[in-house]
Image: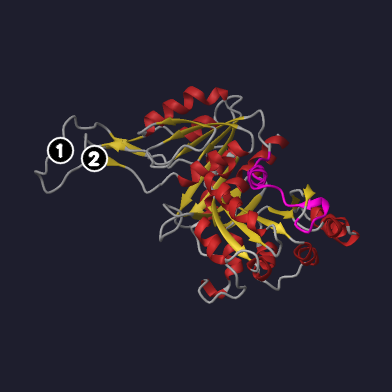
Amino acid sequence: MHNLFNKRLVLGVSGSVAAYKAAELVRRLREAGAEVRVVLTKGGAEFVTPLTFQAVSGNPVHTELLDTEAEAAMGHIELARWADAVLVAPASANFLSRLAEGRADDLLSAVCLATAAPLAVAPAMNQQMWAHAATQDNLHRLRERGVRVFGPAAGEQACGDVGLGRMLEAVELAQLAANLFETGRLSGRTVLVTAGPTREAIDPVRYLSNHSSGKMGYAVAQAVAEAGGRCILVSGPTALPTPPRVERIEVQSALEMHAAVMARINECDIFIAAAAVADYRPLEAAPQKLKKTEERLTLELVRNPDILAEVAALRSGPYTVGFAAETENLEANARAKLEKKSLDMIAANLVGEGRAFGTEDNALLVLTRTTQRMLPTAAKGQLARALVEIVATHFQKG
């Protein structure tokens, strides 16, 4: 269940006796590395209390559609944007009916309508209710809209009946939730991703660098792995853990990053340059710590290799995606970089004034020579998956 690592899951619990299984499901999801927020309906709260879910999730439980403690009192919008995926388990026959109708008269149904994240339901009901034509019609409508249906299982039910309608067990649902992030879009492809800052030594103590945390590049690397690609991550210094199934090569300086990239680039089909590589380095790094003696200190700087432009210029090189961090004129500056460096695609974002660097969210303008798409503010993991999907689509079009 590697794909749940660092994922944000909203778990909806509706009115079914199977709600008691949802507490175990929360535990399984958290064990796999996910952060879980529970949305409990009034019916669900008849079977399991909010306190139980707060204890097992480590987060407050959400129950009210209009939440005065939420930003702008719209908790459903906050949760919908926060979620990498929404799973309703158990999903009662009544909830499936309301979801199929597009109703939004409680918090859980509103979150399901407001989210752009993958949505899945795990039905739980009496076998006759499951078999009823109305339930099957509702499920057909939901599947047509892209809702995933997990189960149900067959067996003895709380009412004494035997048949289809039991909610799947927690371990199976956790695995199916992890599978939501498997797309296979880059199966058989090798992708080299750069991430993080570089450090250009002044002396053994000091260096020149920038504010990049590496979070966006690491999110891209994880999204590549989830898409089935073999990912090589060349990373500057960060405190981030290596995403599962990603090969990580650690570097410090721009020269080291250049050497690492060029040593592996011939293996790659796609190159995504998310690192914030220093444009300049000191001509010489002092062998010993510089002492504070003069009022002024002058450093002579020289240009670092342009890794992105060099890769883009390779004959039969990989599909090349650059990043552009700008403080103004986002589209114009990004398009100029796209053209000047002969890139296949560029993802641009505004930085400064609390934007992008070190934050958990971002927004991206994705440009090719003929297309333009704006990815609005979202968690970096969500943006990374959207970007990798766009890259895969354009790469496969060739």
Specify the amino acid type for callout 1: Leu
Tag 1 residue: 290
Residue 385: image x %, image y %? 60, 46
Answer whether residue 326 is visible to the viewer in this image.
yes
Q: Secondary structure at mark 2?
A: loop
Tag 2 residue: 206
Specify the amino acid type for callout 2: Arg
Q: Is residue 298 above or below residue 138?
A: above
Q: Nearer the viewer, residue 104 or 151?
A: 151
Q: Nearer the viewer, residue 151 or 292?
A: 151
Q: Nearer the viewer, residue 39 or 187?
A: 39
Mark 2 and mark 1 in contact? Answer it, CB < 8 Å: yes
Q: Secondary structure at mark 1?
A: loop
Asked where in the image residue 39 lies, by quadrant, the reply is: bottom right
Per the rendered image, the range of residues in magenta is 158-183
Q: Is residue 374 above or below residue 212?
A: below
Q: Is residue 147 above or below residue 108?
A: above
Q: Is residue 357 above or below residue 268?
A: below
- The numbered dot on residue 322 is none
